[in-house]
Structures are given as C-alpha cells and as structure tokens.
Image (cartoon, rainbow, N blue to C red):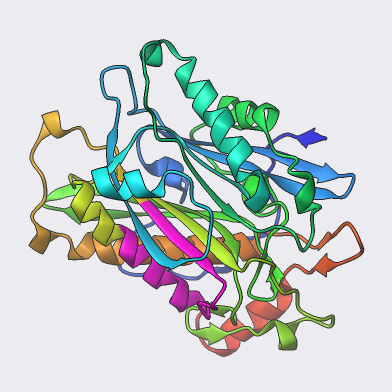
Amino acid sequence: MTSPSSSSTRPRLADLGVAPGAFARGSENAITDVPGVRVGHATLHGDGLHTGVTAIVPDALTARRRSLPANLSVGNGYGKLVGATQLRELGALETPILLTSTLSVFRVADALLGHVLATPAHAHTTTLNPVVGETNDGFLSDIRRRAVGEEQVVAALEAAASGPVAEGCVGAGAGTVALGYKGGIGTASRVVDVAGTPCTVGALVQTNFSGTLRIAGVPLPAEELLTDDPAEPVGNSCMIVVATDAPVDGRQLGRVANRAVFAMRGVGADYAQGSGDYAIAFSVHDPATGGLAADDELSPLFAATMDAVEEALINSVLTAETTVGREGQTAHAVPIDRVRERLARAGVV
C-alpha cells in the first residue's frame, strides 16, 4: 500500500538543544528553505515491504530554463546512480532528483523520464538525463520485488511541496539502516553570506551506512545504547542532495558536493568498502540577476554545507522509528533518552 507523507513525532537535532554552529538554521531547517525547492515522498509499508521514493523538485526548471548548474561527488562509487556521467560532464541538472531502493532505481528512472517527457516543455525533446539515486533497503524490505515504479514516482512528484519535510521512515528512507540504528530521510539548512549576499544551503539525505554515531563529537555506539543487537545495513550507502541559491556554477558545485561527502565523517561514517556514497549539488540562482561568486569567496558556503549535511544525517537517525522487517529483522530507533543523557554529560546541551 502507498501511505501519505507523514513526519516522525520524534525530536530533531535542534529539538535536543544542539546549537547550529557558525551559521543560523533556515526557517524550516530543511532543503525546502532554498527558494522553489519542493520535496515529496511515496512510501510502501506492509506485505513484506518498507520502501519508497523521495522526490526533490526544483521549480527553477522551466520551459525557459531547461537545466540548472549542478555537479556530483563520488565518495565511493559502489552504487547505481542513474544520470551520473552526464551530470558530471555537463555540470547541468535537467530533471527532478529521485531517490529510491537499489533494485527499483531503473524502473524509477524510466518513470521519471516518461513523466518529464509528457510535459509541454518537452514535447519535442529527444534526449534527457533523469537523475535517480539509491541505497539498499534489503535488510528490512523484500527488495527483489522491485516494488517502486510509475505509480509511486507520480505520487511523490505530485506530493512535492515547500515547507516542512517529512523525515525518518518515509519515502526512500522507509527501509534503510544507519550507524547501527534505523536510518531514513533527513534534512537541514543554513543561511550563509556568499559574495556579500545572504544565501541558503539545504541538504536532504538518504542514510544506509555503517559506523559509530557521533553527535557534536559525542560517540553514541549502538552496541552501548541499544539493549538489542545493532542493525547492519545491506548495501551500505548514502545519498546526499544539496540545494542552494548561491551564485555558483557547475564546476564550483562540484567542490560543494565534495564537502557534502566529507560531512559524513562528522557523524561517524566508516566509509566501508561496499558503501556507495554520493552527493549531488545544484543551484537555483538565476544568472540573469547577477554574476558568479569568486572561488576565494566560497569558504563560508563550504562550511555551511558541511554543517547542514551533518545535521541532516543526524536528523535521519533521530526521527526514524523502530521498524520490523519482512522476516523479523529489526532496526531499532536510537533511544532519545540515552542520547540526551550523553549529550548533557558531555556539556553539549
């Protein structure tokens, strides 16, 4: 069955009282704080499935503007990222970005392609580069059924909205595992001055990787905080999407995407051999409104990106709820009371 987008009632990092660092959080503390960026989910829970699709939709893609500056960072290329080579070669994003389950990625890409080609702006298009990323939710979901397809893609795209973003066990994060706990979808944002102009950078992540959770430098090992055995991800990967309205081009966005992958280490990722760790960065800045930032003006944007991604990664774990898989496998939610206790003991909150 397909469930509507719904947000976890569990706390986010900001709710725990952890300060944002050098840059303020955006109004929703989400990727949707970037103007014109919307997010939608379609989720499948039940009948052996915990899976889905998440859509990141930039409204700046129009009939007049057929691509946005974008780029890609490959931390470790053990994955199935459709559209990767052209994204890197041309530094351009032509479609919404969809995230899903590993074995559903090709059906999702075909459905996204069909959806975009059916729009009036693409009535005569003969080449198009859909961008679809994935992580492996096979620990909790019957991944071989390849259950995510056109119905869910259309539902996620039609549900895409601005404002608060549902996190945790929704969309592409329904069946994922991270750092020994239940993982999922997380998001965050920062407001930063770039070349004398206030800008926003937002991140959305799909977490399914191993390591030892850290929040503000405080270790929170699943082996110690859980009374049950930690969950180990299958496929061991992470997808990161960074959006900004900063005046940057495709080449510079490659540098932004690199910083997004770097941020995984701050939350305790071990970058295992089989981990597919990718970051896609794009900008909605309209070049008609002004020139580009110089490279030596980008350091604040880099720092804000790492802060936003790190918080999004943490939010994906904090908001995720305990989930029982198709054969009884269980990914446990991180115990919030024990997290609060350790953060307080360390003087973080």
- Residue at the front extreme of this rendering: 126
- Residue 222 placement: quadrant: bottom right
Q: Left or right: 287 with respect to 314?
A: left
- Given residues 45 and 277, the one toward you in this image is 277
Q: Residue at x 75, y 67 (%)?
A: 333
Q: Left or right: 128 with respect to 237?
A: left
Residue 295 within the segment the image draws in magenta: no
- Given residues 150 and 227, the one toward you in this image is 150
State which quarter of the image contains the N terminus: top right
Q: Which residues are magenta?
A: 257-280
- Given residues 76 and 342, the one toward you in this image is 76
Q: Position of residue 313 (x, y in %)?
A: 53, 64
Give the answer, above or below, for where 58 lies relative to 77: above
Residue 160 seen by the camera? no
Q: Left or right: 46 with respect to 118?
A: right
Q: Position of residue 274 (x, y in %)?
A: 57, 72
Residue 279 within the segment the image draws in magenta: yes
- Residue 3 placement: quadrant: top right
Q: Position of residue 49 (x, y in %)?
A: 82, 48
Q: Residue at x 32, y 64 (%)?
A: 258
Q: How many marks?
A: 0
Q: Position of residue 97 (x, y in %)?
A: 47, 40
Give the answer, above or below, for where 71 lies relative to 109: below
